[in-house]
């Protein structure tokens, strides 16, 4: 029995609306440029020590009609400043510190262990992740490139290592700096499959599909040594 064309059109329209709604649920960060690992430059200038109590890395993973935010603790880090320029720096992330923002049994006892499993971070084997600055230059917005980060003033490039895979990423950031403190914020998207996290990104999975894009927010503070 043939389906009525108007019925088909309605069904396709409903499916399209569901897809659009799913996309609307996705976080919207700057598109980070991802390249191969880069060499670090010589670090010069004054050292600022990361204030781990007031620094965090937030992420949002999402799929069809859902998103799941969480945070990681930063365990250590430094930033080198010469004049008003960032000459280098690095920080280490405790992967096992993962905390889901959504509360309840499903998030605490099912989703969190799954994210820490071999399907994603493989935290038993790779307990930390690392970001190491390789280049910093002034950021200038234009008609085709406007950062989601209010007051973005630098493009920061660095080697991000997750699960023993290192890729260089570049993203805009807003950095406030004075003689005693440094504050930095960034909000960008990366492709998790670049770090061998491929689980669930097959679009044929329908409503079980998990986007390969993950939204990352840096909120870092450091104090002069």
Image (cartoon, rainbow, N blue to C red):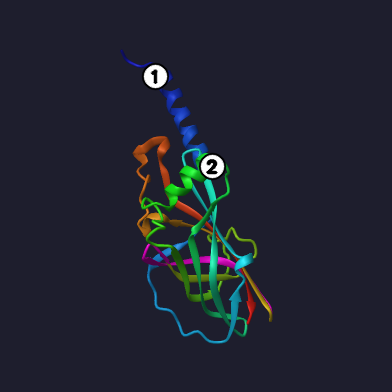
Q: Residue furthest top?
A: 1
Residue 112 position in % (x across, y down): 48, 48
Taking depth in this image into account, of 43 and 147 the one nearest to the observer is 43
- Give the quarter of the figure containing the N terminus: top left
Q: Which residue, given by chain and number where applicable, does mark 1 sit on? A: 5
Proximity of marks 2 and 1: CB atoms separated by less than 8 Å: no
Residue 205, image x, y percentages: 36, 38
Q: Is residue 166 magenta?
A: yes
Dot 1: what SS? helix
Q: Position of residue 114 (x, y in %)?
A: 42, 47
Residue ID at (56%, 41%): 104
Mark 1 Cα shell of 10 Å, populated few (<14), some (14-19), many (≥20): few
Circle 2 residues within 10 Å: few <14, some 14–19, many ≥20: few
> What label does residue 24 carry, if any?
2
User: How far apart are the alpha carbons under marks 2 and 1?
Assistant: 28 Å
Magenta part, dominant SS: strand
Of pointers 2 and 1, the one earlier in the residue sequence? 1
Residue 28 seen: no
Dot 2 falls on a residue whose secondary structure is helix
Q: Which range is magenta? A: 161-178
> Residue at image x 41%, y 38%?
208
In the rendered image, residue 20, in percent from the top left (x then y), is placed at 50, 38
Residue 221 in sight here: yes
Residue lying at 46% horizontally and 28% vertically, measured from the top left: 13
Lateral position of residue 71 relative to residue 125, left or right: right
Find residue 105 and name its label.
Answer: none
> Closer to the observer: label 2 or label 1?
2
> Is the C terminus in the top left, top right, bottom left or bottom right quadrant?
bottom right
């Amino acid at each position: 029995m043939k389906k009525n064309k108007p019925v088909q059109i309605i069904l396709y329209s409903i499916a399209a609306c569901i897809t659009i709604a799913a996309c609307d649920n996705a976080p919207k960060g700057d598109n980070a440029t991802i390249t191969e690992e880069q060499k670090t430059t010589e670090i010069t200038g004054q050292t600022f020590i990361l204030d781990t109590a007031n620094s965090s890395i937030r992420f949002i993973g999402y799929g069809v009609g859902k998103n799941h935010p969480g945070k990681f603790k930063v365990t250590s880090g430094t930033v080198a400043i010469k004049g008003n320029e960032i000459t280098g720096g690095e920080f280490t992330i405790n992967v096992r510190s993962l905390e889901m923002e959504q509360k309840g049994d499903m998030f605490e006892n099912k989703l969190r262990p799954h994210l820490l499993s071999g399907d994603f971070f493989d935290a038993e084997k790779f307990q930390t992740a690392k970001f190491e600055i390789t280049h910093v230059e002034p950021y200038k917005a234009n008609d085709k490139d406007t950062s989601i980060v209010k007051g973005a003033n630098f493009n920061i490039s660095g080697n991000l290592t997750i699960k023993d895979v290192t890729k260089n990423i570049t993203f805009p950031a807003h950095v406030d700096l004075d003689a005693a403190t440094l504050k930095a914020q960034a909000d960008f998207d990366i492709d998790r499959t670049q770090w061998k996290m491929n689980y669930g990104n097959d679009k044929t999975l329908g409503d079980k599909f998990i986007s390969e894009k993950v939204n990352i927010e840096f909120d870092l503070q450091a104090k002069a040594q």
